[in-house]
Image (tube, rainbow, N blue to C red):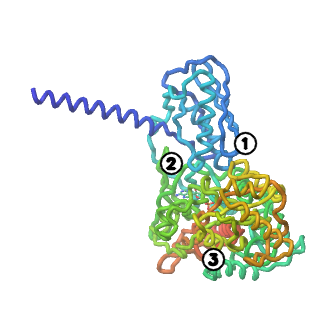
Amino acid sequence: MKKIKWQGIISLALVILMMFVVVFGVQQFSKKTADTPAEGTQGGAQANNGGATVDAADGTYTGTARGFGGDIVAEVTIAGGQITAVKVTGDSETEGLGSVAVEKLPERILKAQSLNVDTISGASISSDAVLLAVANALQEAGIDPASLTGTGDSASVQKTDETIDVDVVVVGAGGAGMAAALTLKQNGKNVIILEKMPYVGGNTTKATGGMNAAETHYQAEQDIEDSVEQFVEDTMKGGKEMNNIDLVTTMAENSSDAIDWLDSIGAPLPKVSFSGGATNARIHSPEDGSGVGEYLVAAFSKNLEEAGIPVYLETKATEIITVDGKAAGVKAESPEKNYTINAKAVVLATGGFGANEEMYTTYRPDLKGTVTTNAPGATGDGIVMAEAVGADLVDIEQIQLHPTVEQSTSMLITEGVRGDGAILVNQSGKRFTNEMLTRDKVSAAELEQEGCYAYVIFDQNLREGLKATEKYIKNGLVTEAATIEELAEKLAIDPATLAETLKNWNSYVAEGSDPEFGRDTGMEADLSTAPYYAIKIAPGIHHTMGGIKIDTETQVINTEGEAIAGLFAAGEVTGGVHGGNRIGGNAVTDIVVFGRIAGQSATDYVDGK
Ligand code: ADP
């Protein structure tokens, strides 16, 4: 009798457990991700709703939702009780992040026949907006989105093992990885790229300024005098002389050639201007004023596609394979597969670790809780993988804060705003620093203010001259007012103090000198044209200067000071180029120059040279 009772209880528990597994298991597995490689087909997005149908009249229904940069519009077509098409448009989403949500989620929704799909990490606002727009369209059709329990075809996904043999595997599809892969392909090598995110670009996409280069043909055509020596000197000075001078010299010497190479692949950077820390006009940017990162990532992607270089998206490298102490490939995993990639050489281009709070607080406990401007893939994987095979690290605790980051969105307010004349004030309505000092100094000054934040103040004249400000306004980051006093009131600052600060500042601009803080640049225009604007900002983690130790040929150096055969690294994953502070415009030079060198060095290694 007792035995039977226990059996009953155990059976009931098992039933409950199974129900639990079914419900949660289905939720897990229905979070299906994209097909790989990127150049492959998307695998015919067919409806699979387990036979269930939606109860709505045939037709196309529309729904909208607010995305990151504007409205997202979804069109959902219902035919024969199935969702047969999902089309989403949202032109204002961030290229490479939100735009990926707009592109990928409709296909996933169609496959799953429900909204229970994997979203795009790093693009949560856009992802949520796409889902909401589709939900609104479904409601328009009289369908309760929550009633859609379709599990797509992913419930049955069982990971399979796959082995791939190539000449070279590049890990990371940011600027450095793409430049390396293009160089390898140009040299006739069989190369693939692994990228853990569902999109390419990494932190490179976020670069707004340009690329520093000296003795370029663009400088010559514009009668700008500059030299490799001066470029080296400026970089060393900016880096507090902590940089590895051999790496800096290699970067500067190859910078002009890198500009020529960008010309040759259809990515010219013809505009040359001044930027912080540079003695001469040296920063090269796109003709149309677009952000250099988005521009280069688009051009690199086009070239990768044309060259037929496979990019395995959502495929994360987890381990470097070594044979007899030499790098011989990587282990990697995607949602569908466990890969063993056998390669004659490995190029690590996984970027920095500015998005990995646990990692950066290990090296810099003082940065706990600081927001980051970094792309979500910047988690230091390459550093960890390289260390596991003996690589040495340099300057790992050198982390750059950017002083003007809007905290609720982590959006970086470009230096161009201050460069065009904006000032910084604290909650008391007073300036507290020369706004044009290096990033580390301005950040430190902000952290000394009450609440550790400040406001960037600008006027209508500045807004009209700087395209970037429109993005901030569109995203609701900007407080606007018809007068300085009204602006102060909206910010809970004493109006008389802010008015006095602006009056003084405008007189300094008129005189061309700032007796309070010694600012002498970004003073071409005063702040006297209404309306007035303010953005609340504080420092955010921006660039991890330290990383894997490399030599000038991008060979990874181990803790014994020896090169690890077959292992190369380039870009933010490495340390030594930027020392204790990276100057604006050098991140792009770093990735293009050393990305290309990594491609060449890996080629030579494979060729036995
Ligand atoms: P860089 O500027 O040095 O090129 P980026 O941040 O632009 O660096 O690009 C690095 C890329 O590497 C990012 O797209 C990131 O998602 C990717 N990545 C990081 N870790 C891995 C990993 N373990 N496997 C594959 N890709 C990775």
Mark 3 or mark 1, earlier in chain: 1
Residue 174 image offset from top left, x and y in percent: 63, 58
In which quadrant will I find the N terminus? Answer: top left
- Residue 220 lies left or right of residue 185; in this view the side is right
Residue 274 image offset from top left, x and y in percent: 80, 71
The amino acid type, in three-letter code, at marker 2 is Ser
Q: Nearer the viewer, mark 1 or mark 2?
A: 1
List the residue tagged with mark 2.
Answer: 334
Mark 2 or mark 3, earlier in chain: 2
Q: Residue at x 76, y 75 (%)?
A: 519
Residue 419 visible: yes
At label 1, counting other C-alpha atoms closer than 10 Å, the crowd grade (few under 14, some 14-19, many 20 or more) is: some
Picture quarter containing residue 143?
top right
Residue 368 image offset from top left, x and y in percent: 50, 64
Real-space Cα separation, disc 3 to disc 1, in angstroms: 42 Å
Label of residue 538 in the image: none
- Residue 468 lies left or right of residue 313; in this view the side is right
Residue 273 image offset from top left, x and y in percent: 82, 69
Q: Nearer the viewer, mark 3 or mark 1?
A: 1
Residue 165, compared with residue 573, is above or below; it is above
